[in-house]
Amino acid sequence: MSQDRWIAARAQMLLDSQVINLNTGSFGPLPKPVFDRVTQLRRRLAEEPMDFLLREGSHLLWTARERLAQFLGGEPKRLVFTANVTAAINIVAASLRLSAPGEILLTDHEYGAMHWCWERAAQRLGLTLRTFALPAMCESTGEIVEALEQALHDKTRLLFFSHVLSPTGMVLPAQELCAAAKKHGILTVIDGAHTPGMIPVALDDLGCDFYGGNCHKWLLAPTGSGFLYLGKGNEDRLHPLQVSWGWHHGQTNLDECNELGSTLRIRALEFEGTRDFCPWLAVPAAIDFQAGLGWDSIRKRNGDLAAYVRESFAKIPGLRPATPAHPALHGFMTAFWLPAGTDANSMRKCLWEQFRIEVPIVDRPEGLLIRVSTHFFNTEEEIDRLAEALFLLGTFRQTNEP
């Protein structure tokens, strides 16, 4: 696409003109057509809630389920809508039964809330929780698989990892990791918070037992749209976090679409009582919006912007890359280590209050990271503004050190 077309695409986004938003990795802004669609749905819900929740919305719910499942390379009868990936993984962690003694194994780069989630699960099940170190700045997917294989042993009951690491944006070889775990009879649960809309995914090809994801990040769907996908053979292993209608479903076909836009099996996990499920219904609009721009074009654009970040930041004294350059190991989040001695709170405050730049500073045991997300609506000028801000802040810190 030409530069003019990207400018036109950016104009379709709801963006604060006073803010440089380089943080789709946390929350994606909404395209105007997606905002209009979810607002239209919410207006209908407000006008006639009974008709919308029990009749009109049911048909839309199954359509949304079909569209998202098709986009993700899965089956609608095994896709459960959730509020977000945290809710999805909690359903798994809170209801799985695993034999003790044993352990739950995580990488050392998992999202903090998810680490706590599995910490509680391990306590409930009488298991230990252990992490293994991922190789830093690796040059091949094989290094990651080897690290996992060395960490597995006969007491490992479950492996949990992120498809795309939140701190650094490194993409893990999910299919290969699942295959390595399966050889030892180990269950696999994947946190796909950053995957939908960033990298192509075919859920049924991954070989995982459970996969949770968000649609409010790179897919640019409304906040409140997430999912849990049940791997084949795992349909009966989970229980809902809340018992509501759908808990007693008899002995009829559990996987047949019904008049409620669900299946009996899915409804037991998905239905939590009355809720606003309009974000789920707006997911097809989000898929259509980016499909209209062209997924290949978007990914090329995002890749070019990520390369621009890497090139620009390499010139800033004191910054070191934290995201591998290998094409199979990175997406559109690029992280750099900040200089030792950087004050995280001061950096966050300055970037926001002085420069109005939305970008996360990530605390890691090894130090501080700055993580830059580049989606198609971002520009090279915005990246330059961040680079200039970091250079100025770095210079200020150096000149004021004792």
Image (tube, rainbow, N blue to C red):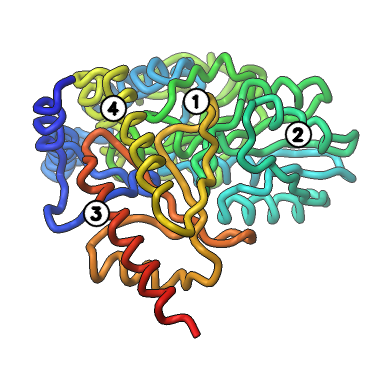
The earlier-in-sequence mark between 3 and 4 is: 4
The x, y position of residue 103, in whole percent, is 82, 44
Q: At numbered mark 2, what does the secondary structure look like: helix, strand or loop?
A: helix
Residue 253 shows in this picture: yes
Q: At numbered mark 3, what does the secondary structure look like: helix, strand or loop?
A: helix
Residue neighbourhood size for the residue with mark 2, other residues' Cα within 10 Å, grouped as few (<14), some (14–19), many (≥20): many
Question: To which residue does mark 1 refer?
Answer: 327
The earlier-in-sequence mark between 2 and 3 is: 2
- 103 sits left or right of 365 in the view: right
What amino acid type should be assigned to the residue bearing mark 1? Answer: Pro
The x, y position of residue 401, in whole percent, is 47, 81
Question: To which residue does mark 3 refer?
Answer: 385
Residue neighbourhood size for the residue with mark 4, other residues' Cα within 10 Å, grouped as few (<14), some (14–19), many (≥20): many
- 322 sits left or right of 216 in the view: right
Asked if residue 70 is positioned above or below residue 187 in the image, the reply reads above
Q: CA–CA distance between discs 2 and 3?
A: 39 Å
What amino acid type should be assigned to the residue bearing mark 4? Answer: Arg
Mark closer to the observer (3, 4): 3
Q: Camera-side residue: 356 or 292?
A: 356
What amino acid type should be assigned to the residue bearing mark 2? Answer: Leu
Mark closer to the observer (2, 3): 3
The x, y position of residue 298, in whole percent, is 28, 25
Please say if the residues under marks 2 and 1 sit with CB atoms less than 8 Å apart.
Answer: no
Q: At numbered mark 1, what does the secondary structure look like: helix, strand or loop?
A: helix
Question: To which residue does mark 2 refer?
Answer: 148
Please say if the residues under marks 2 and 4 sit with CB atoms less than 8 Å apart.
Answer: no
Asked if residue 323 is positioned above or below residue 8 in the image, the reply reads below
Residue neighbourhood size for the residue with mark 3, other residues' Cα within 10 Å, grouped as few (<14), some (14–19), many (≥20): some
Q: Residue furthest bottom?
A: 402
